[in-house]
Image (tube, grey):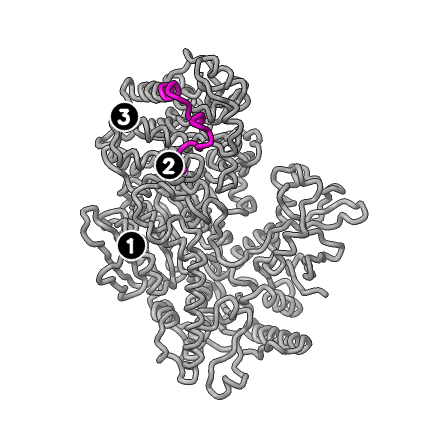
């Protein structure tokens, strides 16, 4: 009579514990047949010692997860269920248990039970040691062995006496017999210990099976023990699987040949560099790491997708994750990946998920999932901690990722299975495009990290623009590469401007994981002799040293003209410059750019201007708009998300690939911040940019003359970049010293990299520019090198001081990431998951980007003196801000991230509107209420929002 789900959580009738175990096992059977990657099935067969045996172990492990509920500690929690258990002869001293402040969680109890029962069934200690954390961790965190025993204050009542021990043994034997066809627990004992990464993967799959089997709509209660059977559970699971539409990816995939490139990409012939990458994937002897370095516009993405297809076919992966540096770059990649997947199988295009916080503003995504509950599939599909026994623990937080109630599904809706749209489950979708943050979180000591690993293992992982990861993010990237290397997940890294040291660090992190070593130093690490290049690294299973192959190819644009580098210095304000003088200098700098563009665009053309700060971009846009009118577009991160998405799409349309490239384009000036720096497929005739570190400067140059055959004005037929954002008229520069830099640029990038870049820029301006792409690797290497001889003699003293300061800052930033990493220093070689979440810094939120990101708020107008609030687009709400369902998108389109200096005041002062407090999507969303002039005050900051400029900030009195 042991119960597993109360009547309130099982459709009005209690669900017996054995039934829930069998339901979960039956779901696992469907996962094996219709979701697990071939590589995962092969791994489990290897763990169990024979083909086909892995399925039995997998089903058993998923089902046995809740065996810890067969204890007084759990059974007492629901009075009606407790009464039935006591009536069957199993009892406990309620007064003792009621007086215990510390609970005995059923996940830990399950591990405790198996550690006692499995050795009796013939399991060896080494296999018990890796299996019990899977059970103890199925609510999201892995405790240490010392945390498993029942609290001593319970005087043995939490676990019960001999009768309870016999009941648990009988439950385990009955369950095992059902799922094995009559065998005992000893029959499912593993033959070898899987890697810790494989254990983490398996743990995530157990959680997935539990959450599906906890859906009371498909698994209503069964309270008659005579009606409990595995056959019945399989029928329930089959119906649920069909209704939920959960599926894997390709399942079986033929290895593509060279001719398939054209079939995937509209008849295009692969370039030499793309063939190089495909051949590297074809030659790789084991799942490993590809590092692809190629110029901007070379076609790295298409090469990576074909490499992913080859690697998936060869090594049994069943899908892909494509990680991008930002939300803005993820959106266009989503469309590219869908088109590629559709070329393999038209039905699969609807099973590509977009994974980032603003995906609802992507029109292609919204069209795909229209009618589904966006991010709202949580409550029905997750293991339910209905009595809080696993809630109030030392890690805190939401153990289940419970989201808002789901709405009825539109039968006509397409898109990934609704189950994948709930919290913490997006990576489990077979094909995923998202920000790199989604992957980096898999390297953090956070709750349910196993679900993220389960979503990455069994896929090919492609990461674009990996050079964009700063030293803080790189700690998480290296940690994740360790786990992926150990899990034997094929990974493809892409970059146009990867510093040599970073390249080596990434390769050695992956190989360290594959070797299960704290550190791995590759001997005779090869450096590419040309550009584009690819490095293929893998570790033989035989224990032999890593195999690292390098190949190069001729670039697509073999005879591209040199990029002319010109200087546009300005006079910069100092720390003590009066406000009036500072404003005059700003206007002077803006006027210099306006005047130059008037001359350059006299015959038309398209210019891209990249400023390093939002304030500079807004100021220049205002000046340009006065002269060029509506030919000017502003794009930055302080635009509300709705207008920003529309404006990004407009920029891609105006400056992206054209239907008729021979037709002249209308004159256009795009003023942007770093949003336009990478994975932004636009073609500019002229580039004006603030000085930035060399690799980022080259990324910006990658938007210049990007496409062939574009009709350009004669004066803009040669690619030119005008570099501004520095001063050469101050005293030090006049005597040969280094230039001065914008304060905002120095804050973002540091003086060290700006100084080394300035030396390269000044030399290029004097010597005729840069030959792109051939000069790229050497330019990046010089920027990130430590050779002072490349700098002018008077610069070397300041450069040495700046380098020391930068190196210290890099170490400090790397150390700030350490508390959040999934494994600590000295624990990289651990054999099991035991204690992975133990200790301080575990379970809570882990920031994978450094620095304060700023609070997000929704902009609304009005609400004063009893008037109705209005959305940013001026649609009327109510006097309380109540939101009709058809207006939710319009409200959320007004979301904007406030600048970091406003965060503390915003957290203290901003609240949701009264009408949002009961709304599932808005109840935790702060509103920034603007007056009739678009202004609001947050602390000492005066904020204003303009439809063209976006959010502006000024310090108020």
> Which sits in the foreground, 924 or 621?
924
Residue 73 position in % (x across, y down): 47, 26
Task: Tell me the tag on residue 147.
Answer: none
Q: Which residue is mark 1?
A: 275
Q: Quadrant of the C terminus?
A: bottom right
Is disc 2 in contact with disc 3, using a CB cutoff of under 8 Å?
Answer: no
> Which sits in the foreground, 934 or 349?
934
Q: Quadrant of the N terminus?
A: top left
Task: Tell me the tag on residue 120.
Answer: 3
Q: Is residue 622 above or below residue 883?
A: below
> Which sits in the foreground, 102 or 80?
102
- At mark 2, the secondary structure is helix
Query: Badge 3, how many Cα within 10 Å: few under 14, some, many 20+?
Result: few
Q: In this orientation, does residue 468 appear? A: no
Of the residues under marks 1 and 3, which one precedes in the sequence? 3
Query: Badge 2, how many Cα within 10 Å: few under 14, some, many 20+?
Result: many
Residue 380 position in % (x across, y down): 52, 29
Q: CA distance from mark 2 to mark 1?
A: 38 Å
Q: In this orientation, does residue 945 appear? A: yes
Name the quadrant containing residue 201.
top left
Of the residues under marks 2 and 1, which one precedes in the sequence? 2
Q: CA distance from mark 1 to mark 3?
A: 57 Å
- Which range of residues does the magenta coloring cover? 145-167
Residue 229 position in % (x across, y down): 38, 16
Q: Nearer the viewer, mark 1 or mark 3?
A: 3
Query: Badge 1, how many Cα within 10 Å: few under 14, some, many 20+?
Result: some
Q: Which residue is mark 2?
A: 203
Residue 714 position in % (x across, y down): 49, 72
Residue located 54% across and 47% down the image? 358
Q: Is residue 833 above or below residue 463?
A: above
Outermost residue, right direction?
865
């Amino acid at each position: 009579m042991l119960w597993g789900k109360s009547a309130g959580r099982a459709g009005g009738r209690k669900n017996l514990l054995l039934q829930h175990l069998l339901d979960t096992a039956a779901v696992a059977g469907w996962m094996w047949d219709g979701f697990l990657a071939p590589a995962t099935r092969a791994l489990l067969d290897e763990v169990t010692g024979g083909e086909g045996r892995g399925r039995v172990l997998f089903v058993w492990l998923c089902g046995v997860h809740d065996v810890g509920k067969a204890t007084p500690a759990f059974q007492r929690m629901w009075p009606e269920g407790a009464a039935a258990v006591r009536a069957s002869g199993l009892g406990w001293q309620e007064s003792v248990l009621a007086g215990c402040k510390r609970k005995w969680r059923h996940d830990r109890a399950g591990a405790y039970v198996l550690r006692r029962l499995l050795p009796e069934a013939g399991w060896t200690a080494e296999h018990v040691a890796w299996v019990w954390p899977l059970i103890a961790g199925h609510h999201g965190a892995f405790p240490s062995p010392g945390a498993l025993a029942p609290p001593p204050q319970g005087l043995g009542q939490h676990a019960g006496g001999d009768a309870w021990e016999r009941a648990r043994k009988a439950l385990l034997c009955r369950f095992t017999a059902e799922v094995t066809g009559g065998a005992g627990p000893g029959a499912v004992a593993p033959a070898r210990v899987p890697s810790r990464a494989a254990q983490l993967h398996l743990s995530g799959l157990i959680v997935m099976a539990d959450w599906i089997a906890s859906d009371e709509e498909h698994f209503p209660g069964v309270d008659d023990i005579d009606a409990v059977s595995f056959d019945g559970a399989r029928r329930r699971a089959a119906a649920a699987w069909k209704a939920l539409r959960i599926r894997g990816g390709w399942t079986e995939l033929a290895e593509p040949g060279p001719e398939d490139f054209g079939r995937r990409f509209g008849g295009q012939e692969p370039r030499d560099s793309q063939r190089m990458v495909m051949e590297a994937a074809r030659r790789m002897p084991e799942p490993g790491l590809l590092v692809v370095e190629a110029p901007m516009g070379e076609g790295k993405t298409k090469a990576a997708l074909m490499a992913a297809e080859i690697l998936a076919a060869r090594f049994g992966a069943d899908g892909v994750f494509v990680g991008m540096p930002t939300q803005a770059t993820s959106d266009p990649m989503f469309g590219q990946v869908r088109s590629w997947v559709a070329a393999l199988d038209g039905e699969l295009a609807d099973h590509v998920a977009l994974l980032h916080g603003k995906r609802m503003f992507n029109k292609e995504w919204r069209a795909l999932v229209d009618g589904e509950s966006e991010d709202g599939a949580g409550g029905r599909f997750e293991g339910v901690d209905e009595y809080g026994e696993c809630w109030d623990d030392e890690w805190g937080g939401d153990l289940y990722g419970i989201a808002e109630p789901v709405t009825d599904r539109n039968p006509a809706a397409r898109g990934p299975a609704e189950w994948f749209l709930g919290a913490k489950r997006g990576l489990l979708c077979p094909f995923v495009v998202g920000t790199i943050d989604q992957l980096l979180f898999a390297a953090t000591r956070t709750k349910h990290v196993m679900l993220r690993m389960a979503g990455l293992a069994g896929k090919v992982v492609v990461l674009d623009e990996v050079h964009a990861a700063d030293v803080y993010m790189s700690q998480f990237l290296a940690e994740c590469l360790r786990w992926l290397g150990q899990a034997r997940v094929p990974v493809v890294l892409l970059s146009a401007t990867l510093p040599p040291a970073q390249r080596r660090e990434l390769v050695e992190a992956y190989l360290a994981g594959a070797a299960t070593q704290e550190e791995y130093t590759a001997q005779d690490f090869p450096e590419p002799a040309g550009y584009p290049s690819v490095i293929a690294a893998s570790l033989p299973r035989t224990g032999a040293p890593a195999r690292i192959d390098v190949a190069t190819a001729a670039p697509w644009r073999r005879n591209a003209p040199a990029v002319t580098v010109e200087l546009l210095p300005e006079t910069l304000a100092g720390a003590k410059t009066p406000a009036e003088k500072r404003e005059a200098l700003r206007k002077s700098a803006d006027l210099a750019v306006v005047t130059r563009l008037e001359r350059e665009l006299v015959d038309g053309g398209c210019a891209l201007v990249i400023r390093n700060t939002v304030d500079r971009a807004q100021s220049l846009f205002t000046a340009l708009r006065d002269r060029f009118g509506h030919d000017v577009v502003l794009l930055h991160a302080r635009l509300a998300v709705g207008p920003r998405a529309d404006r990004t799409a407009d920029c891609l349309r105006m400056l992206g690939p054209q239907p008729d490239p021979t037709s002249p384009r209308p004159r256009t000036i795009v003023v942007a911040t770093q949003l336009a720096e990478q994975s932004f497929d636009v073609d500019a005739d002229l580039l004006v940019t603030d000085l930035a570190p060399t690799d980022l400067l080259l990324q910006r140059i990658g938007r210049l003359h990007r496409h062939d055959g574009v009709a350009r004005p004669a004066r803009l037929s040669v690619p030119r970049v005008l570099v501004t954002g520095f001063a050469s008229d101050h005293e030090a520069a006049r005597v040969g010293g280094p230039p001065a830099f914008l304060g905002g640029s120095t804050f973002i990038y540091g003086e060290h990299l700006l100084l080394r870049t300035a030396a390269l820029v000044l030399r290029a301006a004097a010597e005729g520019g840069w030959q792109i792409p051939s000069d790229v690797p050497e330019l990046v290497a010089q920027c990130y090198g430590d050779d002072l001889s490349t700098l002018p003699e008077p610069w070397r003293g300041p450069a040495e001081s700046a380098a020391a300061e930068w190196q210290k800052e890099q170490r400090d930033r790397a150390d700030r990431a350490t508390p959040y990493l999934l494994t600590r220093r000295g624990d990289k070689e651990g054999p099991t998951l035991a204690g992975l979440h133990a200790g301080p810094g575990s379970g809570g939120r882990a920031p994978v980007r450094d620095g304060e990101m700023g609070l997000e708020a929704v902009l609304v107008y009005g609400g004063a003196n009893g008037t109705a609030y209005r959305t940013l687009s001026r649609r009327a709400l109510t006097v309380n801000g109540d939101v009709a369902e058809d207006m939710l998108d319009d409200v959320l389109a007004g979301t904007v991230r406030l600048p970091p200096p406003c965060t503390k005041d915003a957290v203290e002062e901003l609240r949701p509107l009264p009408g949002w407090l009961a709304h599932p999507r808005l109840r935790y969303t702060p509103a920034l209420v603007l007056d009739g002039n678009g202004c609001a005050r947050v602390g000492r900051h005066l904020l204003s929002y303009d439809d063209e400029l976006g959010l502006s900030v000024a310090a108020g009195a």
